[in-house]
Amino acid sequence: MKNIFLITLLLTSITVSYSQEKENEMIKKITKTEKEWKETLTAQQYFVLRQKGTDAPSESGYTSTFEKGTYHCAACDLQLFKSNSKFESHCGWPSFDDAIKGTVEYVLDKTHGMIRTEIICASCGSHLGHVFDDGPKETTGKRYCVNTTSIKFVKQE
Ligand SMILES: [Zn+2]
C-alpha cells in the first residue's frame, strides 16, 4: 500500500513538472529507474546515455555516415535527427545543424571547467551530446555534436 502511494506521488509530481513545458507536449515522457536502464542498455550506452559520458572521437561509428534516413535515441527510439541535417564537421563526432523540433532539450552544463549546452532526449532524458555555435553559417549556425553511442540510424528505404 505504501508503495502505491509513493508511485502515485511520484507520477503526480512528474505530470505537474512536465505539463509546464508546452513545447514538448506531444513527446511522451519515458521514466525508468537506473536499474532498468542498466538492464536494457549495453555498458557503453549506459555510460554515455545515463552517466553523460563521451565517445572517443572517431571517424567510425556514425561520424562518416551520410546515408538517407533518421537517427533515433538509442535508449527510447524517439526520432531525433534527420540525415539532411547532418554535415561533415571533422570534429570526430556525428554533427547535425538542427534537431527534429521538440525532440531535444537544452541543459546548461558547467562541468569540466567549461560552460556548454548539453542536449538530452526530450522523451527519456538521456544524454546525447552538446550543441555549439560553430555550425554551418549558411543554415542554422549550430553544431549538434552527438555521440554515436547515443543514437541509432534507421535507413530510409
Ligand atoms: Zn530517448
Image (spheres, rainbow, N blue to C red):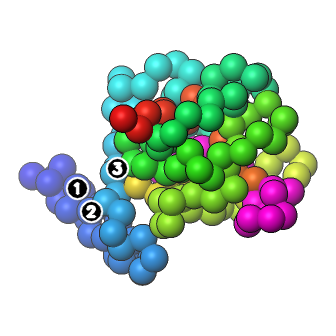
Residue occupied by mark 3: 31
> Which residue appears at 86% of the width and 57% of the height?
134
Q: Assess mark 3: CB under 8 A from ligand 1?
A: no
Q: For residue 147, say whether it is visible.
A: no
Residue occupied by mark 2: 11
Give the x, y percent position of residue 88.
Answer: 77, 40
Q: Which mark is residue 7?
A: 1
Q: CA distance from mark 1 to mark 3?
A: 12 Å
Viewer-nearest of discs 1 and 3: 3
**In this view, which residue lies farthest toward the right?**
113
Of 76 and 18, nearer the camera is 76
Q: Amino acid at mark 2?
A: Leu
Please give left or right for residue 109 compared with residue 100 in the image.
right
**In this view, which residue lies farthest toward the left?**
1
Q: Pointers 2 and 3 in contact (CB under 8 A)?
A: no
Of the two numbered discs 2 and 3 on the same chain, state the one appearing first in sequence.
Answer: 2
Of 3 and 122, nearer the camera is 122
> Which residue appears at 51% of the width and 60% of the height?
100
| Dominant SS type (magenta) | loop
Q: Amino acid at mark 1?
A: Ile
| Disc 3 crowd, CA 10 A, few/some/many (<14, 14-19, 20+) | some
Residues in magenta, as a range: 125-142
Of 7 and 124, nearer the camera is 124
Give the x, y percent position of residue 26.
Answer: 33, 69
Q: CA distance from mark 1 to mark 2?
A: 6 Å
